[in-house]
Image (cartoon, rainbow, N blue to C red):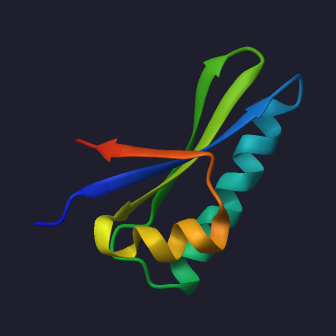
Amino acid sequence: MERKIKLIWEFYGPDAEHTAKHHQEHLGEFAEKENLIEGICGAEYVTEMKWLAYLICVESEMIKVRDALKPLRGELFEE
């Protein structure tokens, strides 16, 4: 079983929640278009002024996704 990678985009400011949720929609569209094996995406609250959008993919697809979407960072995802 391949390792899963969580690719992360961070958003700050009073519109961070809206921006992260909107970005999540586009990540989902990308995952569907590219037929990603996992393609799980979401938005996550950090603080009132900071939200994350993320896309979880398998390690073999990470380079393709990273190069296309330019996430801020990535980390191993463990369920």
The answer to whether 52 appears left or right of 2 in the picture is right
Q: What residue appears at the point 54 percent right and 45 percent down from the top-left corner?
A: 73
Q: Position of residue 43 (x, y in %)?
A: 60, 41
Residue 18 or residue 70, whichever sits in front: 70
Q: Quadrant of residue 36?
A: bottom left
- Relative to 16, is 78 above or below? below
Q: Quarter of the image for the N terminus: give it.
A: bottom left
In the depicted structure, whether residue 41 falls above or below residue 17:
below
Q: Is residue 26 above or below residue 54?
A: below
Residue 57 location (% of width, % of height): 38, 63
Q: Residue lying at the far top in this picture: please name it.
A: 48
Q: Residue furthest left?
A: 1
Q: Position of residue 69 (x, y in %)?
A: 65, 66
Residue lying at 62% horizontally and 54% vertically, measured from the top left: 71
List the single residue furthest toward the right.
14
28 sits to left or right of 35: right
At which x and y percent is residue 33? 57, 85
Name the residue at 81% across, 39% down: 18
Please identify the quadrant where the C terminus is shown. top left
- How many badges with numbers are in the image? 0
Q: At x 39% / y 43%, what residue is drawn?
A: 75
